[in-house]
Amino acid sequence: MKAVRLEAVGGLFLREVTRPQPGPEDLLVRVEASGICGTDRHLFKGEFPVRPPVTLGHEFCGIVEAVGADVEGFKPGMRVTGDPNIVCGRCPHCQAGRINLCRNLSAIGIHRDGGLAEYVLVPQRQAHALPLSLKAAHGAFCEPIACCLHGVDIANIQAGSSVVVLGGGVIGLLTVQLARLAGATRVLLSTRQAAKRALAERVGATASIDPTQGDFIAAVTGSDGLLPGGADVVIECAGVAETVEQSFQLARPGGTVVILGVMPQGVKVALEPFDILFRELKVFGSFINPFTHRRAAELVADGALELDELISREVRLDEVPGIIANPAGPGEVKLLYVA
Ligand code: NAP
Ligand code: ZN
């Protein structure tokens, strides 16, 4: 079968490899769709620890082709999405229910072979059923949705909450939609590209703003601003120092800041502890998808999210190495391999 193999930092190739054999608790899944993510670019550049060779792809769905002897509840022909993040269940964090902080965390598509291939192995504990009636490309969104759901859960959005989302990539655009579903009535998206601002408004943002124009903070929090006094919740989805710093300034007194964007390790930002104390800001990190993959699959199955608008292009497997090796093009949101 064909697979997108990371063979070394900077060395990504479409290769012919042996189709994997399912172990007793594995599903062999014929991949229908597999998303390309910023994390794949980080892995390519050696910015996240990884031990090549490995097949990339941690956002995928497909059809069960075969099951191991001990698999229950899944049969050939079913459609599944795989939660890529595998936890040990034994460490203190797992036993405290904080499975995303597992000491032995490993991931399909990072530490073991992933879904940018014709077939992928999915341990039955990681698999969730999806209806066959669904468009296959939508199934590949379960993983990023599950990560955004965790952030939105942490933010404790309530009916009538006001929310600012910073960064109009796929994570920001999914977060906008989940914030609306959670009950926010005012959701402002900040991103630099006009095409992404227009897209955000099509998928549910009640307003959008270009943070590079004028006094951005005053335009949001000022008495004549879009959210006078600041937002109940700010969700940082860009992963750059500038937006992290803006997050604290955009929250109202007593408001909540959730950091979803990943900044490169070691990079620091300027923040004023006095301001966090004086305004009693609540600041949270949101890491991956603890217990949210099932709900993400249900949201996708229910058609609760606008996903087609987020698909910039469907590509062939042989195009994937070149795409991951290069920065995202202007206006591009989600690129997917679709079989
Ligand atoms: P992305 O496509 O790179 O989106 C980030 C967006 O931020 C860009 O589209 C860019 O749009 C915008 N941006 C950049 N600089 C900005 C600025 N100064 N002000 C406002 N917007 C700015 O990435 P993504 O796939 O959506 O992911 C977003 C972040 O979430 C990444 O850091 C990713 O690693 C992280 N992530 C975290 C988790 C988790 O578990 N916490 C899971 C998945 C992904 P413009 O050019 O329009 O400004
Ligand atoms: Zn653990």
Image (cartoon, helix red, strand yellow):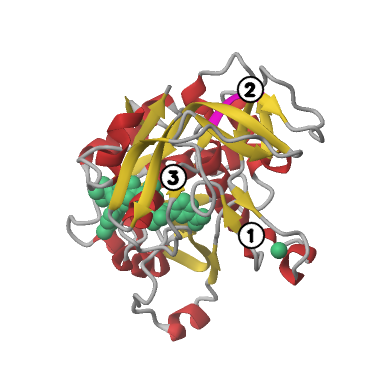
Q: Nearer the viewer, residue 84 or 232?
A: 84
Which residues, given as a range, are shown in magenta? 61-65
Extreme bottom residue here? 274
The crowd level at tag 2 (other Cα within 10 Å; few <14, some 14-19, many 20+) is some
Could one spot residue 166 in this view of the protein? no
Q: Nearer the viewer, residue 12 or 214?
A: 12
Residue tagged 2: 65
Label 3 SS: loop
Residue type at mark 1 is: Asn
* Place of residue 242 in the rendered image (x, y in percent of width and height, measured from the top left): 29, 66
Residue tagged 1: 100
Residue tagged 3: 56
Question: Which of marks 1 and 2 precedes in the sequence?
Answer: 2
Position of residue 128 in the picture relative to residue 337 (left or right): right
Q: Residue at x 45, y 86 (%)?
A: 274
Residue type at mark 3 is: Leu
Q: Is residue 220 above or below residue 283?
A: above
* Place of residue 27 in the rendered image (x, y in percent of width and height, measured from the top left): 67, 33
Q: Kindly report which numbered mark, 2 or 1, lies closer to the viewer in this rendering.
A: 2
Residue type at mark 2 is: Glu
